[in-house]
Image: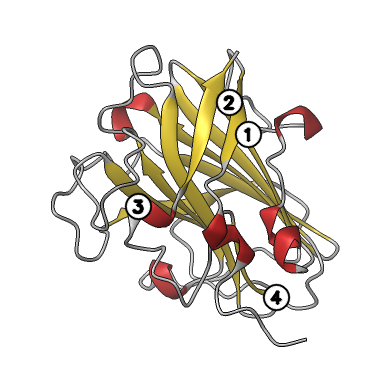
């Protein structure tokens, strides 16, 4: 059978529920269980998922847990090159606009790396949870950029396990321009779990389509209680 010209996920517009949790962050990080798991849409194209992503929301912001498995080597991270590093990359549009091809001032791109914040070497040999690196990145070709968030407003922690890692992240409301769950309970959203060993896993369409800069290619998160 010949390979399809377009990926299956390009043919549909997806919306997934993001469940409410009053307390988004604890001493264990986000620590989201199966209740908060997002569907693995890669299966529509016959690909196995190697990253399990979970999401929750409250008026205080958004939290995510990424569980990566199947690795044999440590993740590759360089805090000076976050766009090229292994980790969890999130795109969020607080206005859920899908009829434009260039990001606006309500569109955000965040990167979270499974590497100790401020260190060049990952603690891959330890099961201890450590503070992980996080940052807000500009979106290529954007018509406007969201206001800059304080570097300390984002929170991330990571714990290595036998064949991968668990990465917890918190994006507070003040780091999300236009975040207003009461008035705008739908968010444009996609993610990319990036790994030089395992490849790329995305929520909506992946490469070579330009999902990194085109909000029309993102899916939707519905903030539900």
Q: Which residue reaches farthest front?
A: 1
- Could you say where residue 51 lies in the image, as x and y percent from the top left? 71, 57
Disc on the earlier residue, 3 or 2: 2
Locate residue 140: give its quadrant. Answer: bottom left
Question: Dot 3, how many residues are within 10 Å of its Cα: few (below 14), some (14-19), or many (20+)?
Answer: many
Task: State the mark number for residue 29.
Answer: 1
User: Which is more foreground, mark 1 or mark 3?
Assistant: 3
Distance from the alpha carbon under mark 1 to that under mark 2: 5 Å
Distance from the alpha carbon under mark 4 to that under mark 3: 25 Å
Image marks 1 and 2: residues in contact by CB distance under 8 Å? yes
Instruction: Tell which of 221 and 35 is nearer to you.
Output: 221
Instruction: Tell which of 164 and 147 is nearer to you.
Output: 147
Q: Residue at 61% x, 29% y: name it.
A: 17
Is residue 114 visible to the viewer in this orientation of the structure? no
Q: Which residue is mark 4?
A: 198
User: Which is more foreground, mark 4 or mark 3?
Assistant: 3
Disc on the earlier residue, 4 or 3: 4
Q: Which residue is mark 3?
A: 215
Q: Which residue is mark 2?
A: 25
Distance from the alpha carbon under mark 1 to that under mark 3: 29 Å
Question: Dot 4, how many residues are within 10 Å of its Cα: few (below 14), some (14-19), or many (20+)?
Answer: some
């Amino acid at each position: 059978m010949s390979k399809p010209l377009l990926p299956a996920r390009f043919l549909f517009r997806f919306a997934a529920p993001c469940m409410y949790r009053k307390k988004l962050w604890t001493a264990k990080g986000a620590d989201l269980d199966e209740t908060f798991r997002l569907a693995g849409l890669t299966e529509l194209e016959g690909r196995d998922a190697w990253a399990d992503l979970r999401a929750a929301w409250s008026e205080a912001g958004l939290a995510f847990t990424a569980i990566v498995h199947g690795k044999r080597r440590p993740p590759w991270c360089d805090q000076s090159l976050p766009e090229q590093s292994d980790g969890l990359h999130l795109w969020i549009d607080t206005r859920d606009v899908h009829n434009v091809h260039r990001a606006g001032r309500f569109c955000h791109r965040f990167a979270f790396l499974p590497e100790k914040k401020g260190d060049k070497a990952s603690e891959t040999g330890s099961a201890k949870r450590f503070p992980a690196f996080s940052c807000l990145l500009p979106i290529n070709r954007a018509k406007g950029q969201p206001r800059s968030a304080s570097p300390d407003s984002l929170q991330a922690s990571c714990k290595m396990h036998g064949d991968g890692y668990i990465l917890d992240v918190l994006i507070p409301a003040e780091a999300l321009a236009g975040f207003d769950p009461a008035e705008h309970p739908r968010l444009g959203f996609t993610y990319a779990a990036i790994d030089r060993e395992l490849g790329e896993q995305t929520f909506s369409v992946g490469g070579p389509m330009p999902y990194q800069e085109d909000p029309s290619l993102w899916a939707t998160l519905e903030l539900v209680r």
